[in-house]
Amino acid sequence: MRATMLYGPRDVRFEERPDPTILEPTDAIIKMTATCVCGSDLWPYRGLEPVTEPRPMGHEYCGIVEEVGSEVKLIKPGQFVVGSFVASDNTCPICRSGFQSGCVHRAFMSGAQAPLLRVPLADGTLVAIPDVPSKDLIPSLLTTSDVLGTGWFAADAANVQPGKTVVVVGDGAVGLLGVLSARQMGAGRIIAMSRNEQRQKLALEFGATDIVTERGDAGVAHIKELTDGLGADSVLECVGTQESMQQAIRSTRPGGYTSYVGVPHGVELNGEGLFFALIHLLGGPAPVRRFLPELIDLVWNRKINPGKVFDLQLPLAQVADAYRAMDERRAIKVLLWP
Amino acid sequence: MRATMLYGPRDVRFEERPDPTILEPTDAIIKMTATCVCGSDLWPYRGLEPVTEPRPMGHEYCGIVEEVGSEVKLIKPGQFVVGSFVASDNTCPICRSGFQSGCVHRAFMSGAQAPLLRVPLADGTLVAIPDVPSKDLIPSLLTTSDVLGTGWFAADAANVQPGKTVVVVGDGAVGLLGVLSARQMGAGRIIAMSRNEQRQKLALEFGATDIVTERGDAGVAHIKELTDGLGADSVLECVGTQESMQQAIRSTRPGGYTSYVGVPHGVELNGEGLFFALIHLLGGPAPVRRFLPELIDLVWNRKINPGKVFDLQLPLAQVADAYRAMDERRAIKVLLWP
């Protein structure tokens, strides 16, 4: 097969690779229906994460099961499945507590920007869809694998509650789906921080009630102004930089909740500052598996349309163009058809 | 009156000071029944917090109301009261959400190591006891003002639940009362980290089930060994150093809860490390006011005896000796009688 490899900064190649095979009896092989590029793929693409050897890329996926290992009991060949970007057994105590991305057997997926993918711990990781979906549902189903699951976790971890005020820091695909998630959870007011007109538009479409374009001190001041001087009940940090993290923490009211789902790069939190902010903090790789059944159901029944974050769709062979478009912020998120 | 002032590192003076007076119509003046030295008083005492001018010391207190301002409605002269170490109006949205230590009008108390104390926002800050307590209850009632309230918050913020496994990092008075609090909340297993025999003994008396003496990597390894390799459900950080904070975070299982109530000094949290730890984090100045009615009730009905943390009692005039005893770890906590 031909698949996506990152050789170094801005060096994405679509090249011949061996087909994946069953390595463990708990594995499954799936034939990719659709995959995409994640914001977190841009860190190594931009050279902000070292790439010491060629790296198979991609961790968002949905497709048809081709083959399963001898110990796979629940997942069957022919099923249409979506899985989390973190493989998990879904039976250990950590999984049972709803934190499958911290599973004692967790494995971060890679190699999904390819026509075939090996999924470890298939019974724990994959969720089968009731039927083969119509093509127009594919983009939204694909989002449940990571980008929607992560935005949803951001809202859940920030304790979004009906009627409460929510701030979303970051207008990437995760932030935009954080807005959609907060709307689904009944937030009263959803303030999206964005200075990009197209993304503001999508944020409003997903349920944002206010847009704040300022950043830093001015951004915090504007949030305070909109919240009786208190700060927001729930703040979702969906970027991963020091600036965005400080923005999020400082926009949260005392006793409020800050979640962070952007993989932190160069973030250092001062203990004393955090102490006197008096906020709940929860973040990390999203336990997407916890949310998959509910999110698939919402998509299947056309209650939400998170697939709108894909404003560019390309054949998988043009994966290098997809990275370029996202790197240059010409596209919010790019879907790839094998 | 004569009261306690800190002039600089290890320079505590008990000296003539003007009696406090009503400055705001919401103030009360209380006649101190008992006060004490807090672990956090040791930071400036040890020169780890700058002292730029002589500073009135003490923020833990209980006593009889002498006088109230014209707008004080609930608190009456003659009542025996306990109050939080943070004054709060107890009516603002932050207070109503249970985070009174983040009150929009919050004021950190000082000057309680004195025979008389001005308490701002008296109606919000103080809680009256049903009757004048017998002398043997005074030490325990005094603890509700901060040290027990803080230990209780540590357990509450770390989501201590019946049957769950709890680790307490720090064997100071707050840590020991964190153990007592976790016991009250029904924790199944309470692991106290301490290498001091006398404190271990009190921890066991307060309900600890295990003692871990190692620190750092060995301490984390021992906790993992005691928790099926997973880490604890709830970890209470009751010190405030980089080492203790890392100890706490690394001892928490993915999806678990770390609270931190020791005022952080020199603590820096790496964003990426925290992200992959996948833990809930909540800390800050304890919203003692939220817990005061319940804690007073537990003490009043002799269900708990947190006053045992006072292993030395001195006349207030010997306050300098009290600081020395705690600084040298000869005493866990020193009660002062005016």
Image (cartoon, coloured by chain):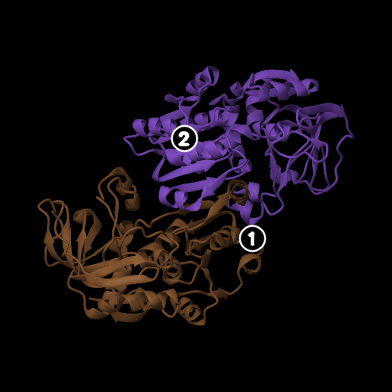
Chain colours: A brown, B purple
Element class at badge 2: loop
Q: Residue at x 69, y 31 (%)?
A: B42
> Disc 1 marks which amino acid?
Leu
Q: Nearer the viewer, mark 1 or mark 2?
A: 1
> Disc 2 marks which amino acid?
Met
Element class at badge 1: loop
Q: Is residue B100 above or below residue B205?
A: below
- Snapshot quadrant of residue A321: bottom left
Residue named by callout 1: A230
State the image coordinates of residue B127 (x, y, percent, origin top left).
Answer: 68, 38
Q: Quadrant of the C terminus of chain A?
A: bottom left
Q: Say whether residue A227 is visible.
A: no
Q: In front: B130, or B41?
A: B41
Q: Chain of mark 1?
A: A
State the image coordinates of residue B322 (x, y, percent, origin top left).
Answer: 72, 22
State the image coordinates of residue A202 (x, y, percent, origin top left).
Answer: 45, 79
Residue named by callout 2: B185
Asked whether, in this view, residue B180 is left or right of residue B328, the answer is left
